[in-house]
Amino acid sequence: MAKRFFILLVLAVAVSLWPPSGPQATDLLLAKITVPKPAKGKGERCVDDTDFMRRNHMSLLDHQRDKTVHRGDRTKRYSLKGCIDCHAVNGKDGVPVIADNPKHFCRTCHDYAAVRIDCFQCHASRPAPGGTAKASAGKSNTAALQSYLRGLEQ
Ligand code: HEC
Ligand code: HEC
Ligand code: HEC
């Protein structure tokens, strides 16, 4: 009886250790999981290593926003406009889709990872026709706010 219990115990431990851990096993497992495949961006490479971008774009964007909004530093490297310009995805009509379309670059992963971002309430989610995604968000918001305040004063 004790012997049978021992055999069961060994089996249980063996099963719990399978598959063997280590990079190879993980790679095999990852290869089987379907992951989102975002459309390729314009040009040869992203503003940083692709893998680095996958993991760190959120903090880069946060940081870029703070630099611009608080310090007026408008360096272009991690600009949200830049992301939108290079990562535009065309719809069936040949026009870049906006963020309410699941094909939108930023949504390919976010939908999968159940991430929701509110950035496109203010920022353009596609390049302006014939141009780039401008910071219209900023100017029109400020203009709207100013005219509203003027209205209150009168
Ligand atoms: C309520 C409106 C609003 C929302 C929501 C918003 N922003 Fe902004 N954002 C602005 C305004 C206004 C500016 C200043 C624009 C300028 O001066 O160029 C700005 C500037 C930026 C900048 C620097 C300019 C650029 O294009 O690089 C970045 C980066 C940025 N925001 C990222 C984000 C991200 C990421 C989100 C979502 C997590 C977000 N913003 C959500 C209004 C907003
Ligand atoms: C000059 C064009 C360009 C700009 C600007 C740009 N990207 Fe990219 N991005 C690319 C290219 C090209 C790739 C694919 C590179 C590859 O396949 O190795 C890419 C890849 C990525 C990926 C990985 C996608 C995947 O397949 O997993 C992410 C995430 C990403 N970019 C986010 C951003 C964000 C966020 C910004 C703005 C801060 C940005 N990119 C700005 C061109 C750009
Ligand atoms: C390669 C997949 C991928 C692509 C493409 C991608 N994201 Fe993300 N993003 C993620 C994941 C995954 C998270 C959640 C990370 C976490 O929770 O730690 C995330 C989180 C974010 C966050 C933080 C959200 C929060 O609530 O904290 C912002 C902002 C963001 N992404 C912006 C963008 C923008 C803008 C684009 C398009 C230019 C984009 N992402 C494209 C995978 C991606």
Image (spheres, rainbow, N blue to C red):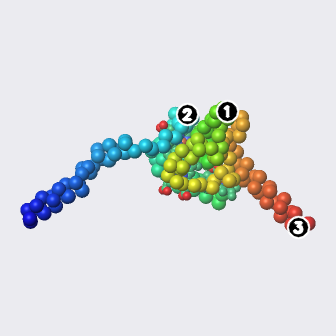
- Between 99 and 41, the one lying in front of the other is 99
Q: Is residue 31 left or right of residue 124?
A: left
Mark 2 sits near ligand 2, with its Cβ under 8 Å away: yes
Q: Quadrant of the C terminus?
A: bottom right
Residue marked by disc 3 = 153
Residue marked by disc 1 = 93
**How many residues crowd mark 3 within 10 Å: few (<14), some (14–19), many (20+)?**
few
- Between 29 and 23, the one lying in front of the other is 29
Name the element at disc 1: loop
Residue marked by disc 2 = 43
Q: Quadrant of the N terminus?
A: bottom left
| Amino acid at circle 3 | Glu
- The answer to whether the residue labelled 1 contacts the one labelled 3, judged by CB atoms less than 8 Å apart, is no
Residue 127 visible to the viewer:
yes
Q: Is residue 87 left or right of residue 13?
A: right
Q: Earlier in the sequence, mark 2 or mark 1?
A: 2
Q: Is residue 18 left or right of residue 136?
A: left
Residue ID at (70%, 48%): 135
Q: Position of residue 99 (x, y in %)?
A: 63, 46
**CA gap, disc 2 to disc 1?**
22 Å
| Amino acid at circle 1 | Asp
**How many residues crowd mark 1 within 10 Å: few (<14), some (14–19), many (20+)?**
few
Q: Position of residue 86 (x, y in %)?
A: 59, 39
Residue ID at (13%, 63%): 5
Q: Residue furthest right?
A: 154
Q: Position of residue 106 (x, y in %)?
A: 57, 46
Q: Is residue 20 left or right of residue 80?
A: left
